Image (cartoon, rainbow, N blue to C red):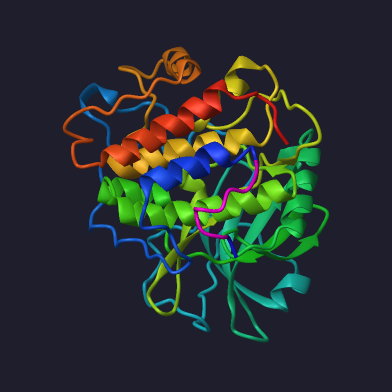
Amino acid sequence: MCPGYEIIWDDISTPLISCFDFLFPVNGTPGSQLSTPRSGKSPSPSPTSPGACANTGSQHSGSSVSLSVYKVCSSMDENDGPGSEVEVMEEGPQVPASIAERYKVGRTIGDGNFAIVRECVERSTGREYALKIINKSKCRGKEHMIQNEVSILRRVKHPNIVLLIEEMDTYPELYLVMELVKGGDLFDAITSTNKYTERDASGMLYNLVCAIKYLHSLNIVHRDIKPENLLVYEHQDGSKSLKLGDFGLATVVDGPLYTVCGTPTYVAPEIIAETGYGLKVDLWAAGVISYILLCGFPPFRGISEDQEVLFDQILMGQLDFPSPYWDHISDSAKVGLLHSFYCLVTSPRFTV
């Protein structure tokens, strides 16, 4: 389990944890619940932003370069529960007999450029899973990315990370049986709820920090932490927690990285500057999410969709707290965010 916020891990995470000490004196706990989003979705494709600050590069699915599709559509039937049967739909690729014998494969619940995700039920136990089907013919030249993602998924086992159950490789497709997360993603929750109380945000960030700390203990950097990749897991007792998914850009850090990747709204300054980066880029993204949870829109934004303007703002790292959107937030929370971003911007770029 992840310790409380008062525990500092190491130099790479000190700025963000210090931010949480300022932000949330209530301290997140493993049982912290997420507030239930209001009914109805915002028509905006991105978290709500004030006036001309909309459409800032935080659109759903972003522009990250990723092969993974862990998101399960939140429109799934509410009556679907453990052991319930999944109707087989005549869509998507037909699964091999070796898989169909063990799993009853149902409808498609997610898709992407290289993969689709379908519901499945293990015939011997009745347990529900998500079956990710990667079309290897669409990944020519990117096979190393698939191998890297799967090798990382094999290693990681944490309550706040979507779990890989097993893998089955065939010539045309790679099949990954994944933990099924039915509660939708944090992006949808934000667009429905707009913003959260500091206590609610504390519980969510606790889950995220635990996942990041665990990955960094293995020298793994995620590189695409954003609300779309944080899935809402609904426990049997009614409580909720977040699970981090989509490891398509994750990699093991054994030296400075220079690949420019990620989603613009959440990308760290050192990635843009191409000066070499490491684990800290995940902490920057977590700081951006902290800001969004409290006010409903990202900290770095422009009056248009000009990505260069957005990147210039990120490189400067200057935060503002516009009224009336931040009037209800405590001064300690604002100071905590300023402290966190200042430490991350001014500290050495590469840290393992």
Of residues 141 and 317, the one nearer the viewer is 317
Of residues 266 and 151, the one nearer the viewer is 266
Which quarter of the figure is the N terminus placed in?
bottom right
Residue plotted at (36% across, 53% down): 25
Viewed as shown, does residue 70 lie left or right of 148?
left
Viewed as shown, does residue 150 lie left or right of 189?
right
Q: Is residue 310 above or below residue 191?
A: above
Determine which quarter of the picture holds residue 330.
top left
Viewed as shown, does residue 205 lie left or right of 347?
left
Work out which residue is located at the far left of the displayed protein and give it.
324
Where is residue 105 drawn, in percent x and y? 60, 71
Q: Which residues are magenta?
A: 3-10
Which quarter of the figure is the C terminus placed in?
top right
- Residue 55 colored magenta? no
Instruction: State whether residue 264 appears in this view.
Output: no
Q: What kind of secondary structure does the magenta stretch mostly adopt?
A: loop
Where is residue 235 drawn, in percent x and y? 45, 74
Where is residue 240 drawn, in percent x and y? 41, 66
Viewed as shown, does residue 2 lie left or right of 23?
right
- Residue 9 colored magenta? yes
Determine which quarter of the picture holds residue 97.
bottom right
Residue plotted at (71% across, 78% down): 102
Residue plotted at (55% across, 65% down): 90
